[in-house]
């Protein structure tokens, strides 16, 4: 019998629909896999005790002839940044340990309504602040490709879970690259939709004007299928776009046929020269471009002169918004409370609670953001950063007047070793230079595997499209995915070392 | 608390020019809160009117109440303001346990309405123009109850309890520019200004405007400058001024207190002060350490408000008459003398009288009840007259009097019942058994008994000495415990005296 | 060079309600100084003629109808509270005893 955990979500969904496999079987297989490998990996903070019951309910409904969504019965891992009524939601922070939300995040509610089975909550950098998942209050997640290396962040748990076949699908959130960079470091697919394309309601906010929820999967088609379930307008999120969207799964299927590459203009950013990336990353990137060129795509150099200010603008806006968003963790209505001494005032209790309950990186960013918003600094920092945002949007507008998509390597290095960057916050921050501009401008961006490094670690390529052109990304990346899998003779993840001694 | 030295008001004004400023917070009476669908309803059990947004629960997001925006635009227009083509929300960051998010969503440099003016009519008919700087939308905070400690105040409390029901109730904050030239009428102008704001929001129907419930809250800024000085003096902001009467008193108090300090060569501390209704004094508030650093920034979860010219025109066309114009019209419609009308105006009762007339009472009767008995009860009990009874109840009361069911005296007793919350006048009449005894049978029985027990009086009446009937009438009224119409009793006494054997 | 000093960091900690140890203040002062030097470059290109973007995709007038929704039950409202009394959230004294 096939190992159900090795199937793509699309393939599993077919077997569920045909009745060949039950959701209980599929869910059990993934729960067993989690039991087998997650003790080492630590991708999950919580495993859903109700998963099998939910799966049985889907099987019952299928047997009863109910009309079910395409992904009904398929297991789903949920980043802990998303609140859930049936599992605790901590956003990777001690201060929220045990927190139970009275409502589901909109994306979770939609996944539930579509019949997906929640497997558990995945690990992340505390409050999504980080690029390595080392900043989780509940221990780091390991990279399934090499346990001495990070899986990226902040959504390292979701990426590792799909890379390690613990879940076929996962939800992530991306503020400066937190879906895409982990995808790059784990050989998986990560999509950041157009800002407003997916509801933020129920996503514990890091930086409201940058956060976007999106899929973390093993294939482009799976990402499209999940995006179709979670996307679209939500009246509970004022910044949600009222647009009606095409089917992203349909776009991915169309792209996989390959002809979309003919005549496609792919922009390559002059200001992101190969010298700025690890050599084997540049090599892999160029090889992917050459493969697309061979199918009739045209590579065009474009200029994005303001990208170099992106990281600086991001490290003003993100901590500023975060310092405000995280002020609610004050020990009054929910979360941890530390009373430093008898008779402590509420101010002292708040300060002691936040000192004890928030991690070092979170405190650092809150202090930085508080500084950036402080009287006398607002214009120099926050005001200027918003102007940089405008300039970066103009860079994209100018570029997309010439090209259909922009391609970059997803990040400058492959998975780094634990501790390698954590002592130098600035170096860690610069790691996001390629992913940040898309968040600042609100444009959609996807990372898919492009190959392996000299030492056998996964490498990703990022595509960026104009606002609202998410479907274009699915078409183009599915086309490249099909080309590369032909070359490789199968998915990149087939080359990952086996975990937990289980074939 | 050490008692402040006060200069006499007359001397204070002689030496110093008062400059006033007001921040009035108006709670809107929308069905739901400013940023969520939680009920906006007074008096519910603690923490039962909440959405995730009111508690700042992780993952919750605000969505603007469209009706609150319309109300705010209407109020801005009624204040003579320009309506911003594009206005936006901002976060005002400070930690306080009554705010779920530890920031208040407000408006900072992009208020929905700005640059207006309000005409305020004083008791003698003089009209003063108050310049308005801005009116902006924001959300209210929850309510803290301080437990333990001697005073029930924040100082010395052992702990505090938080009810977030009020958190997120829509507010419009109306900020004046500095108001010059008020002189000795400063306290009166302060009161008249807040009364005018109250009249405006009531006429717009956008707020319940009950000060005792905090629907309308006034912070009064007062500063003094020596005569002839250009530079403004240091101001204090007196909070917690929650009745019309207190506004007048608090402004007067601050003028006298500041003048005493200045005259003695001291200087005024810029601070918030709290008004104490009981002692009639202000006291220094806690110096707010974060006060000058709210770290305002544009609220990223919300989008700009850009009302169309059509919407603004529609709301402008629907504006009610200006209160001053309305007053002139009402004065002629009601046929009151100047003095009678001023009584109503001074009591802040124009809206109440109007509503009472609309509910079926005559203007004279409406005026009589509101400026008379209702104001008396309000003063005794330290409430607003508008809170003692509703216009509908007052009209019903008068109808009962007109129908002969109640005498004036009985009506006053009924009103006490209404004031005590015993229900409508009819319900009080029924419950307390206060109706006039209109059953002639009962009266005749009492009259016959009185006449038969006083044969000499009966004889006198029969002899045509009608004034002798007074003794019988008195006895009957006493037997009826006052619940009879004396004129009807007199009629019946004469009738029975003639017919009795 | 930025002007991040230990006193400023201490003040920021109190604004943000995070108690910081002396050791944390020393470390944060150095780190913030380096970060701030780096992010200060935003003001290099951000001239006044460039409009500020606060929302990545322009939208306006997103309003909700004034219709009451199902409120949280009191159990839901209080279920995560560290301390409650009489259906309300309990906190310790709001300020220290008066001196
Ligand atoms: Mg104010
Ligand atoms: Zn205010």
Image (cartoon, coloured by chain):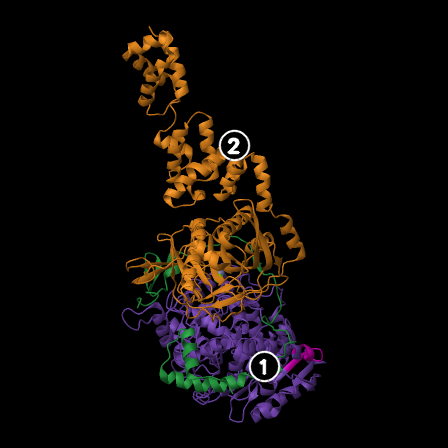
In front of the other: A346 or A262: A346
- Image quarter where the N terminus of chain B lies is bottom left
Residue C43 numbered tag: 1
> Mark 1 — on which chain does it sit?
C
Which residue is labeled 2 in the image?
B362
In front of the other: B313 or A143: B313
Q: Where is residue B136 in the image (x, y as percent from the top left)?
A: 54, 60
* Residue A437 sits in quarter: bottom right
Tell me the mark number nearer the camera, choosing from 1 and 2: 2
Q: Is residue A321 found left or right of B85 in the rendered image?
A: left
Segment tinted magenta in the rendering: A396-406
Q: Is residue C30 visible?
A: yes
Q: Chain C is drawn in which colour?
A: green
Residue at disc 1, secondary structure: helix
Q: Colour of chain A?
A: purple
Placement of B439 over or under A424, stated as above or below: above
Is disc 2's CB within 8 Å of ligand 2? no
* Residue A419 sits in quarter: bottom left
Residue B193 numbered tag: none
Residue at disc 2, secondary structure: loop
């Amino acid at each position: 019998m096939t190992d159900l955990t090795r199937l793509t979500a699309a393939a599993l969904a077919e077997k569920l629909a045909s009745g060949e496999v039950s959701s209980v079987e599929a869910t059990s297989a993934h729960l067993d896999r989690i039991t087998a490998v997650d003790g080492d990996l630590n991708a999950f903070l919580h495993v859903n005790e109700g998963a099998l019951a939910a799966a049985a309910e889907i099987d019952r409904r299928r047997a009863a002839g109910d009309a079910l969504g395409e992904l009904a019965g398929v297991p789903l891992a949920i980043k802990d940044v998303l609140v859930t009524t049936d599992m605790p939601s901590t956003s990777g922070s001690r201060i929220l340990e045990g927190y139970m939300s009275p409502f589901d995040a909109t994306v979770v509610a939609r996944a539930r309504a579509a019949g997906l089975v929640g497997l558990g909550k995945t690990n992340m950098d505390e409050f999504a602040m980080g690029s390595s998942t080392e900043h989780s209050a509940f221990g780091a997640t390991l990279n399934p490709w090499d346990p001495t290396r990070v899986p990226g962040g902040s959504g390292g748990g979701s990426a590792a879970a799909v890379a390690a076949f613990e879940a076929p699908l996962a939800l992530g959130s991306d503020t400066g690259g937190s879906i895409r960079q982990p995808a790059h470091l784990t050989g998986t697919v990560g999509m950041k939709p157009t800002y407003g394309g997916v509801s933020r309601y129920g996503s514990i906010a890091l930086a409201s004007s940058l956060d976007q929820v999106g899929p973390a999967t093993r294939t482009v088609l799976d990402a499209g299928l999940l995006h179709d379930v979670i996307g679209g307008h939500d009246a509970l999120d004022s910044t949600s776009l009222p647009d009606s969207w095409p089917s992203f799964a349909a776009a991915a299927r169309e792209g996989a046929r390959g002809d979309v590459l003919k005549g496609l203009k792919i922009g390559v950013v002059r200001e992101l020269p190969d010298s700025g990336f690890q050599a084997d990353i540049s090599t892999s990137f160029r090889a992917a471009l050459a493969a697309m060129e061979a199918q009739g795509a045209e590579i065009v150099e474009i200029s994005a002169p303001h990208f170099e200010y992106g990281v600086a603008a991001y490290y003003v806006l993100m901590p500023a918004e975060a310092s405000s968003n995280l002020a609610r963790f004050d020990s009054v209505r929910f979360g941890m409370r530390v009373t430093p001494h008898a008779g402590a005032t509420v101010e002292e209790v708040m300060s002691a609670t936040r000192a004890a309950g928030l991690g070092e990186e979170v405190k650092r960013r809150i202090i930085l953001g508080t500084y950036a918003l402080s009287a006398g600094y607002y214009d120099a920092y926050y005001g200027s950063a918003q102007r940089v945002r405008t300039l970066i949007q103009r860079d994209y507008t100018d570029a997309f007047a010439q090209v259909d998509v922009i391609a970059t390597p997803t990040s400058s290095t492959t998975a780094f070793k634990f501790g390698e960057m954590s002592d130098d916050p600035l170096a860690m921050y610069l790691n996001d230079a390629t992913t940040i501009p898309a968040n600042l401008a609100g444009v959609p961006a996807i990372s898919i595997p492009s190959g392996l490094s000299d030492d056998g670690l996964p490498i990703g390529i990022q595509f960026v499209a104009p606002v609202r052109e998410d479907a274009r990304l699915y078409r183009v990346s599915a086309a490249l995915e099909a080309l590369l899998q032909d070359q490789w003779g199968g998915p990149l993840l087939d080359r990952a070392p086996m975990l937990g001694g289980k074939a | 608390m050490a008692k402040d030295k006060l200069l006499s008001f007359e001397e204070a004004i002689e030496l110093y020019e008062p400059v006033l400023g007001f921040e009035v917070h108006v709670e809107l009476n929308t069905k739901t809160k400013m940023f969520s669908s939680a009920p906006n309803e007074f008096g519910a059990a603690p923490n039962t009117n909440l959405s995730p947004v009111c508690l700042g629960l992780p993952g919750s997001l605000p969505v603007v109440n469209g009706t609150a925006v319309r109300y705010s635009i209407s109020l801005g227009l009624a204040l003579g303001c320009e309506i911003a083509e594009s206005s936006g929300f901002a976060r005002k960051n400070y930690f306080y346990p009554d705010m779920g998010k530890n920031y208040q969503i407000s408006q900072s440099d992009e208020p929905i309405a700005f640059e207006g003016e309000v005409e305020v009519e004083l008791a003698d008919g003089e009209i003063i123009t108050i310049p308005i700087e801005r009116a902006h939308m924001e959300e209210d905070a929850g309510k803290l109850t301080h437990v333990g400690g001697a005073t029930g105040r924040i100082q010395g409390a052992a702990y505090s309890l938080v009810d977030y029901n009020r958190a997120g109730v829509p507010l419009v904050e109306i900020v004046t520019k500095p108001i010059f030239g008020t002189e000795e009428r400063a306290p009166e102008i302060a009161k008249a200004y807040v009364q005018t704001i109250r009249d405006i929001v009531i006429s717009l129907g956008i707020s319940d405007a009950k000060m005792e419930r905090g629907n309308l809250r006034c912070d009064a800024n007062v500063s003094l400058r020596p005569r002839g000085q250009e530079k403004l003096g240091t101001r204090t902001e007196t909070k917690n001024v929650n009745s019309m009467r207190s506004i007048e008193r608090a402004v007067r108090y601050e003028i006298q207190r500041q003048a005493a300090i200045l005259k003695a060569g001291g200087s005024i501390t810029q601070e918030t002060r709290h008004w104490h209704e009981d002692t009639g004094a202000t006291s220094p508030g806690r110096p707010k350490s974060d006060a000058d650093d709210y770290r305002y920034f544009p609220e990223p979860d919300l989008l700009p408000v850009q009302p169309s010219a059509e919407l603004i025109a529609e709301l402008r066309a629907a504006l009610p008459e200006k209160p001053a114009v309305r007053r002139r019209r009402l004065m002629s419609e009601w046929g009151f003398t100047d003095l009678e009308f001023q009584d109503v105006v001074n009591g802040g009762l124009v809206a109440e009288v109007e509503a009472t007339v609309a509910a079926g009472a005559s203007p004279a009767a409406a005026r009589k009840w509101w400026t008379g008995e209702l104001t008396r009860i309000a003063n005794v009990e330290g409430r607003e007259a508008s809170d003692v009874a509703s216009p509908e109840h007052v009209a019903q009361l008068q109808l009962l009097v007109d129908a002969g069911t109640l005498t004036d005296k009985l009506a006053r007793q009924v009103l006490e019942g209404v004031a005590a919350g015993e229900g409508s006048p009819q319900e009080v009449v029924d419950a307390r058994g206060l109706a006039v005894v209109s059953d002639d049978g009962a009266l005749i029985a009492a009259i016959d008994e009185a006449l038969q027990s006083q044969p000499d009086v009966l004889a006198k009446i029969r002899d045509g000495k009608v004034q002798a009937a007074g003794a019988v009438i008195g006895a009957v009224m006493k037997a009826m415990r006052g619940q009879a119409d004396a004129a009807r009793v007199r009629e019946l006494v004469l009738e029975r005296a003639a017919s009795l054997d | 060079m930025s002007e991040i000093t230990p006193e400023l960091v201490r003040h920021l900690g109190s604004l943000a309600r995070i108690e910081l140890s002396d050791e944390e203040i020393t470390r944060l002062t150095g780190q913030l100084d380096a970060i701030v030097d780096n992010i200060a470059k935003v003001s290099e290109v951000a001239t006044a003629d460039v409009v500020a973007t606060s929302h990545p995709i322009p939208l306006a007038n997103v309003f909700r109808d004034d219709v009451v929704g199902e409120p949280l039950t009191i159990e839901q409202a209080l279920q995560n509270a560290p301390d409650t009394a009489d259906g309300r959230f309990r906190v310790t004294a709001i300020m220290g005893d008066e001196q």
